[in-house]
Amino acid sequence: MNKQDYFEDNLYLIQIRIRIIQDTLILNADPGLFLEKALEDIDFIDKILANYLYKLQANRQRIDRDGLLDHLTELERQFSKALYDSTEGSGSISAREIPDLKDRLSALHKACLERRETLQSLGSAMEGYQVEPVISSDEFNELLKDF
């Protein structure tokens, strides 16, 4: 069976989930209703972002790799900000209001920062890589001579 991945669509859905977490942390949501779900979403996002970083590290031949690295880097930045806001924020679901969260969110924030560093190094490594043309300019001109 041909296994397809839908990186762009999946990353878009992750972006929406990050936004929901940010909104949950900004608003004074009832922790009894939303804390467990917010933590589940945070763990889910962390797992997916780590998984996609691994996939992009393993597949250096992917055509759209640079764009996906950029998108993943932006999602990591947004996720990092959401985690930081929860650690330092004053919303009802924050480390200030729920002290047990501080260590957990700090560990996730650290992992997020490490992934961002890895993404930056992958992006830097790609900048020095020059893609060789598949055909020479003479072959290209020969192909287009009738047009």
Image: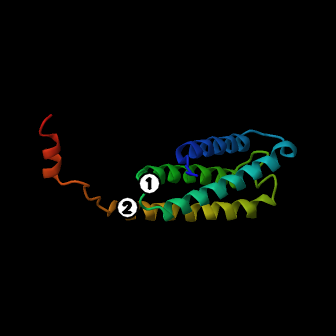
Q: Could you give the CA–CA distance between mark 1 and mark 2, rounded to whole angstroms?
A: 9 Å
Q: How many marks are shown on the rendered structure?
A: 2
| Badge 1 density bin: few <14, some 14–19, many ≥20, Cα 10 Å | some
Q: Are marks 1 and 2 in contact (CB under 8 Å)?
A: yes
Is the C terminus in the top left, top right, bottom left or bottom right quadrant?
A: top left
Query: At which x and y percent is residue 114?
Result: 56, 65
Residue at left offset 43%, top offset 62%: 60
Q: Which mark is residue 65?
A: 1
- What's the residue type where badge 2 is placed? Met
Q: Nearer the viewer, residue 144 or 22?
A: 144
Q: Secondary structure at mark 2?
A: helix
- Within the image, what quadrant is residue 25 found in? top right
Coordinates of residue 51 in the picture (x, y in percent):
60, 59
**Residue ID at (34%, 60%):** 127
Identify which residue, 133 or 93, lies in the foreground.
133
Number of other residues with Cα within 10 Å of mark 2, as a class: few under 14, some 14 to 19, many 20 or more: some
Residue, far top? 147
Foreground of the two, 143 or 119:
143
123 to the left or right of 137: right
Q: Nearer the viewer, mark 1 or mark 2?
A: 1
Q: Which corner quadrant of the image does residue 106 belong to? A: bottom right
Q: Which mark is residue 107?
A: none
Q: Position of residue 98 (x, y in %)?
A: 82, 54
| Residue at image location 81% in from the left, 60% down from the top | 100
Q: Residue at x 26, y 55 (%)?
A: 134
The relative height of residue 127 versus residue 139 in the rendered view (above or below) is below
Residue flagged by tag 1: what amino acid is it?
Arg
Q: Position of residue 144 (x, y in %)?
A: 16, 40
Q: Label 1's element?
A: helix
Q: Which residue is mark 2?
A: 126
Task: Give the mark nearer the N terminus: 1 vs 2.
Answer: 1
Residue 125 left/right relative to 59: left
